Image (cartoon, rainbow, N blue to C red):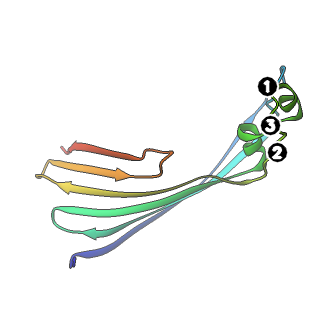
Amino acid sequence: MFTNRVADETAEFQAGADAAHAHQVGIVLAATEVETDQGADVSRTFIRAPKYTLGGSVSGTWVTGAYMRSYFGVTPTQAAATGYPIYRPGSGFKDVCLSLNANYLLSEQWSVVTAVGSPNQMPASSFLVYSF
C-alpha cells in the first residue's frame, strides 16, 4: 500500500481553426472550408513518492464534418476512380489517447521517464533525463 498519495490533477482545453482553399484535380479533392477542432487533456498524478511518481492522462480532439471529410472522406469522383464506396463522415472524435507514465529519480540530476500510451500514438517510450 502506498502512503504517499497525492491527487495532482491538471486539465487543458484547446480550440483552433484553420482556413484553406483548394480545388479538385482528377480524383484529388480539397474544398474551401473552415476546419475547426476542440481538444481536451486531463492529467493526474496518482502516486507521488520521494523517488518516483506515477500518473496518467486522457485526451481527445473533436473535429467538424468538414475536417473529417477532408482527411477521411471518399467523394463520388474518388469512389468511381478507385472502387471504394462513397464515404461522407460527419463531425466527431478524431482521436482519443490514454497514457500512463512513471518517473523514477536516480539522483538529483538524473531520472528515468517511461510512458505507455495508445497503440497508434507512441505505444511506449523511456528516456534518461538530465536536469540542470
Q: Residue at x 84, y 40 (%)?
A: 86
Q: Front-most of 79 and 129?
A: 79
| 31 displayed left or right of 36 | right
Q: Position of residue 117 (x, y in %)?
A: 43, 52
Per the rendering, the mark at residue 1 is none
Image marks 2 and 3: residues in contact by CB distance under 8 Å: no
Residue 81 on image: x %, y %: 84, 25
Task: Say which residue appears at 22% left-offset and 76% top-offset.
Answer: 2
**Are there few (<14), some (14-19), or many (20+) residues within 10 Å of tag 1?**
few
Q: Separation of disc 2 and disc 3 at Cα?
A: 7 Å
- Residue at x 28% of width, y 70% of height: 47
In the picture of the structure, the residue carrying the numbered disc 2 is: 88
Q: Earlier in the sequence, mark 3 or mark 1?
A: 1
Q: Which residue lies under the disc numbered 1? A: 28
Asked whether, in this view, residue 63 is left or right of residue 101, the answer is right
Disc 1 marks a residue whose amino acid type is Val
**Are circles 3 and 1 on residues that touch, CB within 8 Å?**
no
Closer-to-camera residue (82/132) = 82
Q: Identify residue type, mark 2.
A: Arg
Q: Is residue 15 left or right of residue 84?
A: left
Q: Is residue 56 above or below residue 88?
A: below
84 and 29: which is toward the camera: 84
Residue type at the position of mark 3: Val
Image quarter for residue 130? top left
Which residue is at 71% across, 38% downward? 71
Name the secondary structure under disc 1: loop
Q: Which residue is mark 3?
A: 74
Q: Secondary structure at mark 2?
A: loop
Which numbered disc flags the more N-terminal residue, 2 or 3?
3
